[in-house]
Amino acid sequence: MQPSYARSIEVSKRVRFDIDRDVIRARSLDFAHKFLPDGLSKVDELAFLGREERRLFSQVQGRTYANMFGLVERFIGPQMLLASRDHWLGDQTAFEALVRFTDEEIKHQELFRRVEALSAGGMAPGYAFLPKPNEVARAVLGKHAWAVLALICHIELFVLAHYREAIEPDAELSPLWKDVFTFHAREESQHALIDELEWKREDAKLSAGERDTAVSDLIALVGAVDAILQAQAAADSSYFLSAASRRFDAGQALAIGRTMLAAYRWQYIVSGVQDARFQAILGGLATPQQMQRIGEALAPIVRP
């Protein structure tokens, strides 16, 4: 089915949720369970970790996973408000779809703030989420709208892939943590419809030179995301080492750090750019030469 604004509104009405009534339901996170599935955390690459250590590894990453989505939604909402200007005095169905989209992104920020508070209540002190959301959002929104919409589409498509391929099938996750990302994915499904429509609409405005500039901005944005991931992976590795119940030798500590970064790069960059739907949209907008530039920029991240 081709994406449409009317379709996104229909989905929005059908899957809309309330944080307290539908998701939290007066529950707490269950720290006897994992948060992030093994396929996303890459914990299987650390054969020397015991059962409790594997669980802690997933919980550290799961805490950051929620915080990362709270971060990106800080710029997704404003970008969609900016996009809505073109519909104010025109297509009111498109305008409603974008208003609903923005409202849901604001709600998601609150949802992930709640997850952070619940995580802090049950985990050892010392965790730090390093990126400053307003600073990151300001930098992202300073880039070409085409590049920002490409990044947003990439994010919301990997949300759906992560849920479908890893989170939904895993019966060992904390029930509340899993419910958070179940309800989140349901609303993101219609956001992805709008992402594609708005990205293509923005693309239709551009000259060849403008599109080439936009591709450069997209490459810069991916580089900025990777810098954030490198810093957060280092912080989360240090936190894991301090919170674990035993000391690790230097080689094990190095492996933990490398795996944390590999997992974050997979979660927030690679799984999105390799998504078939994202590849199809991007390949339909960028020239072969631009696709080559993007591939070359991604190579050190995809194959470090």
Image (cartoon, helix red, strand yellow):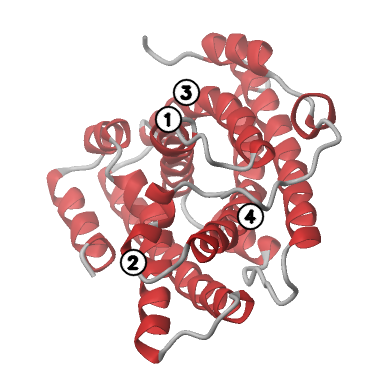
- Disc 3 from disc 2: Cα separation: 40 Å
Residue 191: x %, y % from top left: 54, 28
Which three-letter amino acid code belongs to the residue tagged 1?
Arg
In which quadrant will I find the N terminus? top left
Q: How many marks?
A: 4
Identify the mark nearer the N-term, 4 or 1.
4
The nearer-to-camera label among 4 and 1 is: 1
Identify the mark nearer the N-term, 3 or 1.
1
Which three-letter amino acid code belongs to the residue tagged 3?
Leu
Which three-letter amino acid code belongs to the residue tagged 4?
Leu
Which residue bears the numbered disc 4?
A: 71
The image quadrant of residue 79 is top right
Which residue bears the numbered disc 2?
A: 47
**Is residue 45 or residue 291 the one in the foreground?**
45
Residue 256: x %, y % from top left: 41, 74
Which residue bears the numbered disc 3?
A: 193
Label 1, secondary structure: give it: helix
- Disc 4 from disc 1: Cα separation: 22 Å
- Pointer 4 and pointer 1: residues touching (CB < 8 Å)? no
**Is residue 130 or residue 253 the one in the foreground?**
253
Label 4, secondary structure: give it: helix
The nearer-to-camera label among 1 and 2 is: 2
What residue is at 46 percent from the left and 43 percent from the top? 155
Residue 273: x %, y % from top left: 31, 46
**Crowdedness of circle 3 by 10 Å Cα count: few (<14), some, many (20+)?**
many
- Disc 4 from disc 3: Cα separation: 21 Å
**Is residue 99 or residue 181 the one in the foreground?**
181
- Pointer 3 and pointer 2: residues touching (CB < 8 Å)? no
**Crowdedness of circle 1 by 10 Å Cα count: few (<14), some, many (20+)?**
few
Identify the mark nearer the N-term, 2 or 4.
2
